[in-house]
Image: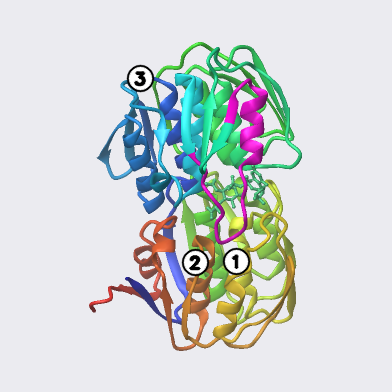
Amino acid sequence: MDRILINGGPRLNGRVRINGAKNSALKLMAAALLSDEPLILTNMPDLADTRFMATLLEHLGVNITRPSETRMDLHANGLAEPFAPYDLVRKMRATFNVLGPLLARRGTARVSLPGGCAIGARPVDLHLKALEAMGAQIELDEGYAVAQAPKGLQGAQISFPFVSVGATEHAMLAAVLADGETVLNNAAREPEITDLADCLNAMGARITGAGSASIIITGVSSLSGTTHRVVPDRIEAGTYALAVAATGGDVIVENCVPDHLDVLWDRMRAIGVQVEGQDDQSVRITQNNERCGAADIETQAYPGFPTDLQAQFMAVVCRADGASIIRETIFENRFMHAPELSRLGADITVHGREAVVRGVAQLHGAPVMATDLRASVSLVIAGLMAKGQTEVNRVYHLDRGFEGLERKLSALGADIKRVSEAG
Ligand code: EPZ
């Protein structure tokens, strides 16, 4: 199993280019199931998660090619049996989003339930209720959702009790081919939702209101193919910005949408980092202080502070001059990086969904391991500013969501390398 070795200290300088968003790409890939014409996705990241999704889609009969590093062509003109087995679903929740498109296109589907994960129980009840509201009959049978819609899906009024990114996307992916109008109330407003709506509309869907809390979808009888550019990954962009906040330096983060991270820029300015928008695709991050200041954050659905940047922000304020309070409101168990950061000398106390981080003058390198993607990268950030060597284990978590992490950080001046077990 690979490990990452980091010798902390060097400041980061230069330019870093951001990839397309993993969390958008995965749902866009599922959208390919809705048409018998090719869907061409550009600005595609090449990640363990996108490869895993491709394996499931190929099992479902989608023909997938990668004509270049950043392009994926998906052609679902000869769908196989609409069956998504446990082994191809369990590792990644986004795979569950094939249920709605399969049901919309084939009228029947059997998809394994994704199960919980390290950051929380993460049920799919809202996904199932949305599909049921559209007329699907769903039974849970030995860990599978077995769904039928023999007369097709019908438009429905769906009010989500709380905001769910996955359930909003899943309802959109089903409603585009439903008969009549679907209204999604209390919908998620993340940029990935807008990206999915843009792609579906380019395929011939009729969706308005994406990016607001109320999305209206007028069903159409079929969708065509299209070419769509995946929205830049705001979490990857935010992660590099926070890495500069941690080490100090001067970096231009390119190929991102700075407006998607307004709440992060506000919090970074609050801890003394300079953030200057260069244009609508890049932002310059400058940190000249020896230590950053402290600031509180509370995670919220977009446009609030993203839960997917909470761990990285926590890593940065471990060396702040002062105490910060971090509240996690989205997932019930998303502080598992805290004990690992403490192994580097951080002073963190967790009470339920709140963590108090008292900044220390210096972190010290140590072996650490993480249980999820964003937690892993928070340990990399901590390692970049720690004195001595940090060894990050379970690197496969990082490979799920950060393409070329060591390469990009090395290019900015970090002392970081990957070693395999053998050497
Ligand atoms: C998406 O997960 C992202 N994943 C997550 O990123 C991200 O943290 C999350 O949205 C919030 O922004 C993908 O897009 C693949 P939710 P999702 O449904 O859709 C509860 C990463 O590191 N809930 O908005 O699963 C749920 O348990 C990942 O890239 C239900 O109770 O998130 C959570 O507490 C991690 N029932 C809350 O809602 C449901 O049916 C919000 O989850 C659905 C969700």
As helix, strand or loop, the secondary structure at mark 1 comes to helix
As helix, strand or loop, the secondary structure at mark 3 comes to loop
Q: Which residues are magenta?
A: 112-138
Residue type of the residue flagged with mark 2: Val
Quarter holding the N terminus is: bottom left
From the image, tell me which residue sits under label 2: 377
- Establish if 297 lies above or below 143: below
Residue type of the residue flagged with mark 3: Glu
**Does 40 sit left or right of 247 as displayed?**
left
Label 2 vs 3, first from the N-terminus: 3
Label 3 vs 1, first from the N-terminus: 3
**Does 9 sit left or right of 332 as displayed?**
left
In percent of width and height, residue 42 lies at 37, 37
Q: Quadrant of residue 89?
A: top left
Q: Is residue 231 visible?
A: no
Which of the labelled discs sits on residue 323, or is there none?
none
**Does 47 sit left or right of 335 as displayed?**
left
Quarter holding the C terminus is: bottom left
Give the residue at the far front of this rendering: 142
Q: Nearer the viewer, residue 247 or 326?
A: 326
Q: Is residue 17 visible?
A: yes
Q: Nearer the viewer, residue 406 or 4?
A: 4
In percent of width and height, residue 259 lies at 62, 46
- Pointer 2 and pointer 1: residues touching (CB < 8 Å)? yes
- How would you rate the neighbour count of disc 1 (Cα within 10 Å): few for under 14, some for 14-19, many for 20 or more? many
Which of the labelled discs sits on residue 37, or is there none?
3
Residue type of the residue flagged with mark 1: Ala
From the image, tell me which residue sits under label 1: 311
